[in-house]
Every structure is written in C-alpha cells, then in structure tokens.
C-alpha cells in the first residue's frame, strides 16, 4: 500500500477543485487532486459559464474557453408570454457568458492544475483518515493513503468530505435535481421556461433551452426538493411532458424522447444553507459548500471563485485558514444566498403561488428597467454592476427580499454560522505559507 503526504489534498477535480489545486500549486504548496473520473469526463450541466465565472478565469489568467457567446436571456412564462432579460457589462465582469461543454471545460481546468504542478490521482476517495479529531486525508479505493495538512472537499453536491467532517445539517440543505439532454435545433437566445404541467400548478423549478457549444441545443428541466432527496426523480419523469410543451413553444427545438438520447441528471445543493463551509483543516468549495444560486441554478462561477478563495486562505500569512475562508465566502455570497435560499424555501410546495409569481414576473419583465434589474438581481451580479437603473432596481429587489425573508427559519440558519476565530467551531487551522517559504 502506498502512502504519501502533501500540504493539501483536494478531493474532486471539477471547476472548484481544479481551481483550488491550480492556485495552491502556483502558490508553491504541494497539492494532490484526486478524482474518481478520468478526464475528459462529462457532467450534467446546462453548459453555460456565466459572466462572473469568466471574470474569475480572467483573474486567474486562463484564456476564455472556445464556445458560443450567450448574453440576453429569454424568459418564457407558463402561458407562453415572453420577456427578454438584457445582460450588460459590469465594472468587473463581461457582458456575456459562454456555452462550452463540461467535457472540454473541466478537462481544460484539470490540465491547468496539473500543468501548474498539482499531482493528479485517478481514484475514488473512500475512507477518511484522522489524526485525533483532525481530518488528515483519505484512503483511496485502490488502497493508497493520501495524507495532508488540509483537505479540500471539492467532490460535488453529495460531498463525502462534507459529511465526514460533520459540516452538513441534512435537515436544512436545499436540494435540487436537474436533467439535461442534447438535442438537434437552432437556438438564438438562451431561454428559461416556467412550466405548468397542469394549469395554475407550477412545476417546482424551471426548464431551459440553451444553445449548444457547437450547434444543437442543451435542454433540461430542474426542480427544487427542499431537504427531500427522494423527490428528485420527478424531473426525469416529467421530461417527456416538458418536451411536448417545448414543441408547442417554437423556441427552435422540437425535442422528443428519441432525439434526446439518454438524459444525464445531477444534484444541486443550493443557497449555502445547511452547510458550514469550513472548520479546522477541512474546507468545502463549489457544490460541496452548497453554493449554487437557488434562483437560477448557476454554480460554475461560484465553484471557480470559492476554489480560489480556499487556496488563498490556505496560502495566507495569518493562519486560521478556515476562518479566513468562511469570512471571504460570506462577504462574496452570504447577503444574496441568505435571501435567495429563503425565497426558494418559501415557494417550494406552493404551486399556485409560484404560478401567480411567474405570471407577474413575466408582466414586469416587459418593462425594460425591471427586466434589467431582475437580470442583475437573480444572476447575483449586483456587486460590480455599473451605476444605472438596472442596478437601482436590483438593489431595491435585494432590499425587499432581505426585509421580507429576514425572520424566516432559512435566513436565520445563517446566524448560527461561525464567523470569526473566537467561535467554538474553530480550531487553529494554520497556513502552509511558512512551510512553503522555508
Ligand atoms: C443538470 C444541471 C445543469 C446545470 N447547469 C449549469 C449551468 O448551465 N451553469 C452553471 O454555472 N451551473 C450549472 N449547474 C451547476 C454546476 O454543474 C455545478 O455548480 C458545478 O459543476 C460545480 O462544480 P464543482 O467543482 O463544485 O463540482 P463537480 O463539477 O460536481 O465536480 C466534482 C468532482 O468530484 C469528483 N468526485 C466526487 N466524489 C469523489 C470521490 N469520492 N473521490 C474522488 N472524486 C470524487 C467527481 O468525479 C467530479 O469530477 C448545473 C447542474 C446540473 C445538475
């Protein structure tokens, strides 16, 4: 049995893990990144990297991936009414996203990490290894033991690192499940579709039709299930009915069960609620930390950003990596996620109310200032938005959302999160900077 020791073990080499490994290796840390899949590998996704994700890539000095530019988004209501949400360039982010397959995108990031010096291990992390009460590494399926000063859980929504480190309160997590399929067609604008399988009974999520990276379309359907992971299968069961609905909408695709091949599904862990992002020597990034936007399902940008923040916290001079990481993550995401998670928790299980909200939003979405503000708000683009009416509207929506959700049990869950080094959760989690510099 082989045994090895690194400064940092990263479990999972999706966007979050590869970014963390890349930054750690660039910073001089010895880092191993283990993934059960061989790259290139597929992953269920709408395949759109949003403006904030492209901003992180720029900051990392990684060239924008080849793919199709996407900008404005069409929102289609249950009655077929449409609104176009404009996208605009921010002070810090571009005015577009990119449609790129996860096969290509994730392989590019994985290669960037290994080129920077991260050791890539193809294996499944299975059994946590402990040094007293400290998570010290993993025994892999193949039998080797990898130990490290820090363990980063980048192993996706159903993270075993999060579970082993006791960082998940399963009763509070907001789960979603979504399926996607590639189908023929020509898509001009990415579309998000609110659907009612029965009139005035909204589907508890939404569907999408996105342009394929190299032609065709990526279509899918996702739903929110609160903490109930048995309810996810409904997305797969509902897909044929949703395809039928799409055939009537005239969005440039006419999907059928036959043309869709074998749809691929995956879990989404949303809104940060229920997951403590770091404690001691264990840090969670990307979906493992529950960073998916609860309003529109985006998670790649947050995965890239959190991977970077976790690496910076570990490499930082001050020690207390877990504290630094939690604070940085809270500064970037907590204000939005706290209210977005509460909004989602309040609407799941209320199909009539959601049907009414969808109809109202579609009416409001025809007013340009409101459509632009809605776009900034729900895409979590307020920080870095240029001073204009869209930002003013997004600010107003944020304020209303915060005030109306402040006392919900979802919003108040965050009050219990450890925030500084004096709290009971925190052990001195140190830094690898001194070792790197020695
Ligand atoms: C259907 C669907 C559509 C989506 N569409 C979009 C979209 O269009 N845009 C967007 O921004 N987001 C989208 N998301 C969310 C997005 O896919 C995730 O937020 C993103 O993949 C998170 O990246 P990650 O690195 O945290 O995790 P992942 O990409 O899930 O990577 C986790 C990695 O960990 C590895 N792993 C897991 N367990 C182990 C183990 N025990 N040992 C070793 N390796 C392990 C896996 O093989 C995997 O490579 C979508 C999600 C779904 C399900």
Image (tube, grey):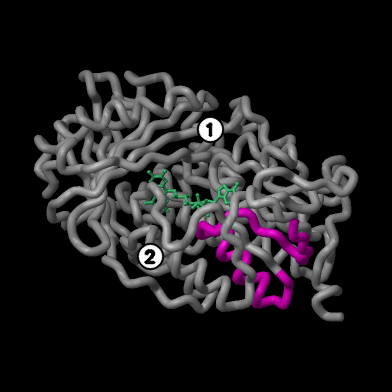
Quarter that holds the N terminus: bottom right
Considering only vertical position in the picture, is 402 above or below 434? above
Q: Which disc number belongs to residue 329? A: none
Ligand 1 has an atom within 8 Å of the beta carbon of the residue at disc 2: no
The residue positioned 57% from the left and 73% from the top of the image is: 114
Locate the C terminus and report the quarter of the image it occupies.
bottom right
Disc 1 crowd rating (10 Å Cα; few below 14, some 14-19, many 20+) is many
Task: Provide residue 169's location: percent of width, then percent of height.
Answer: 67, 31
SS type, badge 2: helix
Magenta-drawn stretch contains 6: yes
Badge 1 is on which residue? 174
Report whether residue 330 is seen. Answer: no
Residue 243 spot, x, y in % from top left: 18, 35
Q: Residue at x 53, y 36 (%)?
A: 341
Contact between labelled residues 1 and 2, with CB atoms less than 8 Å apart: no
User: Which secondary structure, mark 1?
Assistant: strand
The residue identified by callout 2 is: 104
Relative to residue 200, is residue 77 depicted above or below?
A: below
Looking at the rendering, the stretch of residues picked out in magenta corresponds to: 1-30
Q: Quadrant of residue 245?
A: top left
Q: Is residue 77 left or right of residue 432?
A: left
Query: Where is residue 36 shown, x and y percent of the image?
Result: 55, 52
- Residue ID at (55%, 35%): 403
Residue drawn at (62%, 25%) of the image: 171
Q: Say if the magenta span includes residue 354.
A: no
Q: Nearer the viewer, residue 334 or 100?
A: 100
Between marks 2 and 1 in the image, the one whose residue lies nearer the viewer: 2
């Amino acid at each position: 049995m082989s045994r090895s020791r690194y400064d940092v073990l990263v479990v999972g080499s999706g966007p979050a893990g590869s970014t963390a490994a890349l930054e750690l290796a660039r910073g001089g840390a010895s880092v191993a990144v283990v993934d059960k899949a061989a790259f290139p590998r597929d992953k269920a996704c709408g395949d759109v990297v949003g403006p904030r994700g492209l901003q992180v890539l720029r900051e990392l000095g990684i060239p924008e991936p080849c793919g199709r530019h996407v900008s404005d988004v069409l929102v289609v209501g249950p009655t077929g009414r449409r609104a176009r949400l404009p996208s605009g360039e921010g002070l810090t982010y571009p005015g577009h996203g990119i449609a790129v397959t996860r096969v290509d995108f994730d392989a590019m990031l994985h290669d960037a990490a290994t080129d920077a010096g991260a050791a890539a291990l193809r294996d499944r992390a299975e059994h946590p290894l402990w040094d007293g009460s400290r998570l010290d590494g993993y025994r892999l399926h193949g039998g080797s033991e990898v130990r490290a000063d820090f363990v980063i859980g980048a192993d996706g929504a159903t993270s075993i690192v999060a579970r082993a480190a006791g960082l998940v309160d399963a009763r509070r997590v907001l789960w979603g499940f979504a399926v996607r399929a590639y189908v023929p067609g020509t898509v001009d604008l990415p579309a998000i579709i609110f659907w009612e399988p029965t009139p005035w009974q909204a589907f508890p999520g939404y569907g999408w039709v996105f342009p394929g990276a190299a032609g065709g379309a990526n279509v899918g359907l996702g739903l929110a299930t609160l903490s109930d992971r048995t309810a996810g299968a409904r997305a797969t069961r509902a897909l044929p009915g949703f395809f039928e609905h799409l055939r009537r909408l005239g969005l440039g695709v006419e999907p059928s069960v036959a043309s869709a091949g074998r749809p691929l599904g995956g879990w989404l862990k949303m809104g940060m609620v229920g997951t403590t992002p770091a404690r001691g020597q264990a840090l969670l990034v990307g979906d493992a930390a529950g960073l998916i936007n609860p309003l529109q399902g985006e998670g790649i940008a947050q995965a890239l950003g959190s991977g970077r923040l976790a690496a910076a916290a570990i490499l930082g001079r001050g020690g207390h990596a877990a504290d630094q990481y939690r604070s940085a993550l809270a500064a970037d995401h907590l204000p939005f996620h706290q209210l977005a998670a509460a909004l989602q928790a309040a609407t799941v299980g209320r199909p009539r109310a959601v049907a009414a909200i969808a109809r109202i939003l579609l009416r409001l979405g025809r007013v340009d200032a409101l459509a632009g503000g809605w776009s900034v708000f729900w895409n979590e683009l307020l920080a870095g938005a240029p001073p204009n009416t869209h930002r003013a509207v997004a600010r107003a929506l944020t304020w209303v959302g915060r005030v109306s959700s402040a006392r919900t049990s979802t919003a108040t869950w965050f009050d219990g999160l450890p925030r500084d080094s004096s709290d009971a959760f925190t052990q001195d989690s140190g830094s690898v900077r001194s070792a790197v510099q020695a």
